[in-house]
Image (cartoon, rainbow, N blue to C red):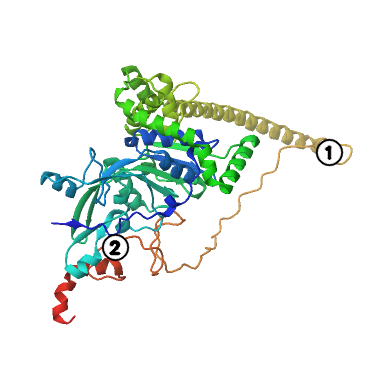
Amino acid sequence: MNTYTNDSISDVPGWEARPVFPFSAILGQETMQKGLVLNAILPSIGGLLLRGEKGTAKSTAVRALARILPERQVVADCPFSCAPGSGLCFNCQKRIRNGQTLPLKTQRVRVVDLPLGATEDRVTGSLDLKKAVKKGERAFLPGLLARANQNILYIDEVNLLPDHLTDIILDSASSGYTHVEREGISYEYPSSFILIGSMNPEEGDIRPQLLDRFGLCAEVSAPSEAATRRRILRRWEEFEQAPDAFFQSCAHEQDRIAGDILEARKRLSQVKMSGDMEQLCSSLALEAYVAGHRADLIMQKAALALAALKKKDRVWEADVREAAELVLVHRRRMPRSPSGREPEKNEKRSRDGSREHGQEEKARDHEHNHEENQGRDNGAGQKEAREESGQGEQEDQTGDGKESPGLEDISPVGEPFQVKPITFRKDRLPRKGSGRHTRSRTQLKTGRYVKNRPQELPGDLALDATLRAAAPFQKQRQGSGL
């Protein structure tokens, strides 16, 4: 039976020991704050993507949100921070079946940062090398997704994260569990977290199929009003000079937001949505030409969370349309035309109309050319007749010695010739594509380590994976002198 170890899951102070700018003191980013609060009320919305330019308080808002969320009870000695009443890991379920009482503790919501250079084994978990070498046991060492359970997982520059890691994280966020199959270990543990990703569109976008997995999206930009920017500057100066005093000045507003989130969580089960509002969600999704049904479902959840936040007992049209602004901004594929008709039909009619218009122009040009050629033939006949009568030269020249304007001269087409080929020297690097965001395969042993895989005749050795695969057998080698 596989076991786990919690040696690496320790409460590292990190940013939690440093002062954080208050969530209520952030100005000019109401849409971003709304998206964060909705995910805090209902994490099953699917996370939030913050898309905007640098220096717009994206990471500051994420860390500030964790400070206002209410504390929750978790199992004290569980590396997955299992919470009673939610998904429990295999070991906690086993202890309950054996009649044991799970020790509980109160813990603040944490922000778990996922760096861009993290490998798959660090994200999902892998073999505990220490136990494998000393005891020959295959123990599971939890990764970042285990630490993020019941917390906030924040990925800065998510558009630069490798695609295979993005797939793993989004699958875990949607299912609530992470399944690991590596180094002879098969393990599954709960990973229910609030996924927050931030990116700068100038550095590249995310694949559409991955972009759709984020529940909400907020376009973040710096305020354009000079007065608002000046207020932001003053607040930041006050916070840097006296963080504790500034935080105390915002304590009342912080408590109000935290109370609204806690009350909305309790009220959420009582909020109702009528069939007309469900129909409106589907209609708005169809108008945005989204792919699949995820937009309809998330729009309903976001509208319910908004109504609960506003202390309503039912969802109104304004709540649905307000939720649609966050749900459809990154899923809209083709806007509806002003006339209300489908763009495909309009495009087809435009093509048909342009085709008919082109045929009419061809007919007019053909008729014009026919008349012009006929007139040219008549003129040539008249000229020949004048030349025969001896009047040609007198009529072709004017009094100033210039020839009268006639038809333009057309030069004959030259003889075809062979174009000299221009060749460039090719390098010896086999490629499958070009550009920064495309996969390229080279023969050089450089670049970032992405993943490992078993191979009979390896050309390059993954040292960490090799050690993990060989570690459980180290105890057997000690007696053989190896």
Whether residue 331 is visible to the viewer of this picture, yes or no, is no
Inspect the image, locate mark 1, and give the three-letter code of the amino acid beneath it: Gln
Inspect the image, locate mark 2, and give the three-letter code of the amino acid beneath it: Asn
In the rendered image, the vertical position of residue 265 relative to residue 150, given as above or below: above
Q: Earlier in the sequence, mark 2 or mark 1?
A: 1
Mark 2 is surrounded, within 10 Å at the Cα level, by few (under 14), some (14 to 19) or many (20 or more) other residues, namely some
Is 114 or 250 nearer to us in this picture?
250
Relative side of 386 to 222, left or right: right
Assign a secondary structure to mark 1.
Answer: loop
- Observer-side mark, 2 or 1, equals 2
Which quadrant of the view contains residue 139? bottom left
Is 478 or 291 nearer to us in this picture?
478
Q: Find residue 48 and report its horizontal and vertical position in percent.
A: 40, 39
Q: Find residue 254 and report its horizontal and vertical position in percent.
A: 46, 35
In the rendered image, the vertical position of residue 228 relative to residue 286, given as above or below: below
Assign a secondary structure to mark 2.
Answer: loop
Q: Are marks 2 and 1 in contact (CB under 8 Å)?
A: no
Q: Which residue is mark 2?
A: 452
Which residue is rendered at x = 40% and y = 58% of the image? 117
Q: Which residue is mark 1?
A: 397
